[in-house]
Amino acid sequence: MALEIEIAGRNLEVTDRIRDHVNKKVGRLDRYLPGIEEARVDLAYVKSARSAADRQVAQITVRGKGFILRSEERADDIFAALDTAIDKIQRRIERFKGKRNRGRGDGKSAAEVTPSVVEEEESGELGPVIARRKRFLLTPMNELEALEQMMLLGHENFFIFYNANSNSVNVLYRRRDGTYGLIEPDIA
């Protein structure tokens, strides 16, 4: 199975040379981790960056069954940013491979385990506008796996996950003193 690579450019034209470079380099990632189903490469030119050396941004996200790995790098050249992002994602893949031999819950998906949500009726009042809506699949995991996944994704502040031990959605967050906190919501 060939790795599906999606390339997106923002404030940057994705030329054939860039596309060939991405396909050549990112196409090799499935050698390191055969379970990769798709890879997304976001390339951007950020004009408002403080330093000229940080204006070219390359972000690589790889998805597979039960994992998402991401790396982002900035440089003054898009090829340099892409190469360092690929090196970083390869290191994350190696780290993930070394720690992934644990089971995940009872094998049920989060959709099967969570109760259905009742939608509230809309009122005629205008409130804050939701500018962006994001959906993602939750994989059941325990707290240690969530902490590991948070680090692998490069999330600095928080991580939302479905706790297989308590059968609820939890939020893992980094506290100011460097320790971690866990939010376990209760439904009233």
Image (tube, rainbow, N blue to C red):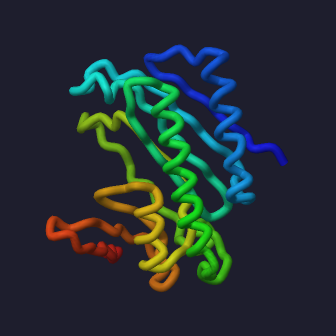
Q: Is residue 147 above or below residue 32?
A: below
Q: Residue furthest right?
A: 1
Locate the C terminus and report the quarter of the image it occupies: bottom left
Quarter of the image holding residue 17? Answer: top right
**Could you tell me residue 8's position as x and y percent?**
56, 27
At 60% from the left and 22% from the top, the residue drawn is: 18
**Could you tell me residue 80's position as x and y percent?**
48, 31
Task: Report whether 78 appears left or right of 159.
Answer: right
Quarter of the image holding residue 28? Answer: top right
At 69% from the left and 25% from the top, the residue drawn is: 20
At 65% from the left and 24% from the top, the residue drawn is: 19
Q: Is residue 124 above or below residue 43?
A: below
Task: Report whether 186 appears left or right of 87.
Answer: left
**Could you tell me residue 110's position as x and y percent?**
58, 69
Q: Is residue 100 above or below residue 72?
A: below
Which is more toward the observer, 78 or 34? Answer: 78
